[in-house]
Amino acid sequence: MIRFLGKLWRDRRGNALIIAGAALPFVVGAAGLATDTIQWVVWKRELQRAADSAAFAGVYAKLQDSAVPAAVNGDLANNNKTGITLASGYPQIAYPTVGTYSYAVQVTLRVQKTLGFSSLFVSSAPLITASATAAMVDDGQYCLVALKKSGGAGINIGGSSSANLGCGGISNANANPAVATNGASYNFIAPVVAGVGTLPSAITGVTSLRPHHSAMPDPFAGKYPTSTSGMTCNKQVTGGSTNLTPGCYKDFSFTGNKTYNLAAGTYFLDSTDFSVAGGVTVTGTGVTIILTGTTPGSIKTNGNSIVQLVAPTSGTYSKMLFIQASNATTDNTNEINGNNTSNYDGAMYFPKGNVTFTGSSGNMTKCAMVVAYTATFSGNTNLQNSTTGCSANQTVTNKIVKLVA
């Protein structure tokens, strides 16, 4: 018997089977844990995507003064792909203050689901939590904004034009492209050009291109009173004094090789154009010109004219040089022209108008901001906003919705 046991002890032919049998629980355990881990990661990833999307929906709802919880729950119905019912009390929605961001919305989600292998050893299913915070964040300074949304490009650059913005330009056009270029002899210097639609593969002089961008809200919409209601609109330029005072004009055409001086104040143009003929000089500081009436007029300046206007730096129309009422004909033409002694200092707002820059000077609009239905560059225009010597320059900050946490 002792000899048999000794022989059995020395026999190694069954060792592999014994070792395999001993290791089997560890192999099964490792496979089970790996399977549970993969399933947990998948659920966590899908839950995080749902939280991210819901946070975006919450911000957009807040921007539109809509109910944030309804927007969040509606988004979760479409984008929560875990297939697991949210834990009681979720989603949790908060509105944190996050640095300099605005309209922040935080969405926290939680699910509880049994894992196949782990459930053999734990008394309760694990909790999986995901949280996301989205907000409006600054996305650069712009001094050229084209408001047109469809039907073609909002910004057109062509011919041998030369423009030096010194600031960003953005087109709200959902077009292909949103910014159109024509020819190869133009130069359009800007740190960034963005568009809701596509953009050319390159724009000469532009540092950064941002296609498929969010639209820029009209920064001046509803901000300024433009009606002539209650005013007596009987003033006129033709045949009158060359020293003009604020008020409501039925004629604002400058002719006769004269120099016209505009006193500081607001000039309402009742269904008439701001028209400057060749050989005319128009000057004024602290001036705002509003094109209004039942059929608002346009800007028409001759290339041989001199226009030197500076917007006010305080009051209702602070830093606003030209304002065209929103009831103007869509895509009406406004031409900014002039020679090397012309100067426009202040914002130009034409929500329904196309503004065309055709000047032969690189200085005449160095202090201007332009918000228009469309903008066309066909001449040498130095449209800037950060040049020394400007008193009424301004920019607008665009914002986009991004995840911030």
Image (spheres, rainbow, N blue to C red):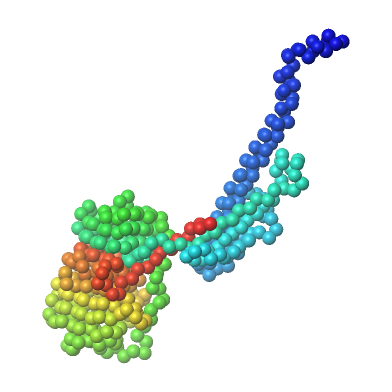
Q: Quadrant of residue 330?
A: bottom left
The residue drawn where x is 32% and y is 52% is 200
Query: Is there any visible trace of residue 192 in the rendered image?
Result: yes
The residue drawn where x is 29% and y is 54% is 203
Q: Is residue 48 left or right of residue 16?
A: left
Query: Which of 353 and 207 lies nearest the eye of the viewer?
Result: 207
Q: Quadrant of residue 75?
A: bottom right
In the rendered image, the vertical position of residue 19 relative to residue 315, given as above or below: above
Q: Is residue 37 left or right of residue 157?
A: right
Query: Which of 14 and 225 lies nearest the eye of the viewer?
Result: 14
Q: Is residue 12 left or right of residue 249?
A: right
Q: Please state, as top left, top right, bottom left or bottom right, where the N terminus lies in the image.
A: top right
In the rendered image, the vertical position of residue 5 relative to residue 134, given as above or below: above
Residue 69 lies, in percent from the top left, at 60, 64
Residue 392 lies, in percent from the top left, at 30, 74
Residue 332 lies, in percent from the top left, at 29, 70
In the rendered image, the vertical position of residue 329 relative to residue 213, given as above or below: below
Query: Which of 89 and 196 lies nearest the eye of the viewer?
Result: 89
Number of disc labels = 0
For this orientation, the residue located farthest to the top is 3
Query: Which of 54 and 128 lies nearest the eye of the viewer?
Result: 128
Query: Is there any visible trace of residue 250 in the rendered image?
Result: no
Residue 292 lies, in percent from the top left, at 32, 80
The residue drawn where x is 50% and y is 62% is 135
The residue drawn where x is 59% and y is 49% is 46
